[in-house]
Image: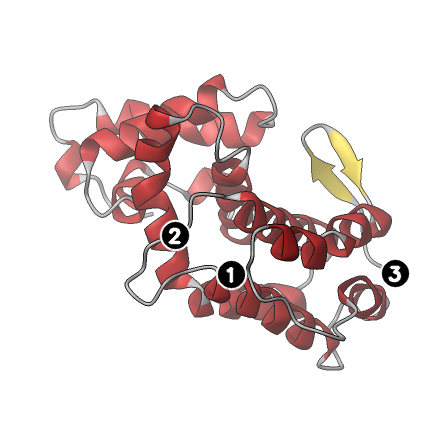
Amino acid sequence: TASAARCNSVMATVEDVAAVLQQLPLRAAENAIPDLPGVDFAGLWMQAAADPECTTPVLEQLLGHIEALINAATAPDGAVPGSFVVYEQCFQAVSLIAQVLNTAGASRELIKCLSNVAEAYDSLLKVVDTCEYEEPGCSGLLRMYMLQILSSLFGGTRITGRHVMELTNNDTSAAVSLMAWVLRCAAADFSIQEMAGRALAQLSTADSVFLPVA
């Protein structure tokens, strides 16, 4: 069976993931984003959870559907719509899956998923700070879920200031803003905040541009 994992100081369960996935088609419809008719997200997840080593392609299929929703919500020029609800729901689901299915097979599929939505991921990090300035709270916990995925897959202690700069396209203001938001976020667990504090400390040194790659 799938192993439970920590999520915001609460034990995440298979049922938690299913509850989030059940909301995806509804959130897509509410934001005029084409969903995937006939796709049973929660049903696919229950099958995937029963096969944590990914000996069948069920998890790949589920993540493919989530990728389709993320990419459908992103315009061809990389712009994102005014509402971040669908993104937040999608990345929350992926974050929970990464924590509950803590196996090599699942990690392989999740990394592939991140690669397939890389353009949307980068676009979101570019615009969310500006959108939050204009409408505080509009992105919800999207940034936290995006970073939790990286922490779950690669280990929060391995993410450095250099990695944060790469995530924000070498925009120092964006990198500092992102890490500062994490430190202020009451919903972020300690491991994410520790990562943010360490990255800020690394970026505050005079030789931060020469930070070694972990």
Q: Label 3 crowding class (10 Å Cα cut-off): few <14, some 14-19, many 20+? A: few
Q: Residue furthest bottom?
A: 56
Looking at the image, is mark 1 or mark 3 earlier in the sequence?
Answer: 3
The residue positioned 68% from the left and 48% from the top of the image is 96
Q: Nearer the viewer, mark 1 or mark 2?
A: 2
Residue 170: x %, y % from top left: 19, 43
Looking at the image, is mark 1 or mark 2 earlier in the sequence?
Answer: 1
Q: Which residue is mark 2?
A: 80
User: Disc 3 on helix, strand or loop?
Assistant: loop
Total numbered labels placed on residues in the image: 3
User: Disc 2 on helix, strand or loop?
Assistant: loop
Q: Which residue is mark 1?
A: 70
Residue 124: x %, y % from top left: 38, 48
Q: Is residue 19 left or right of residue 181?
A: right
Q: Nearer the viewer, mark 1 or mark 3?
A: 1
Q: Label 2 crowding class (10 Å Cα cut-off): few <14, some 14-19, many 20+? A: many
Whole-number angstrom distance, CA of label 3 to CA of label 2: 37 Å
Vertical arrangement, residue 18 with respect to residue 68, above or below: above
User: Disc 1 on helix, strand or loop?
Assistant: helix
Instruction: Look at the image and tell me whether residue 102 can be seen.
Output: no
Disc 3 marks a residue whose amino acid type is Thr
The residue positioned 76% from the left and 82% from the top of the image is 56
Q: Is residue 30 left or right of residue 75?
A: right
Q: Nearer the viewer, mark 3 or mark 2?
A: 2
Q: Which residue is mark 3?
A: 1
Disc 2 marks a residue whose amino acid type is Val
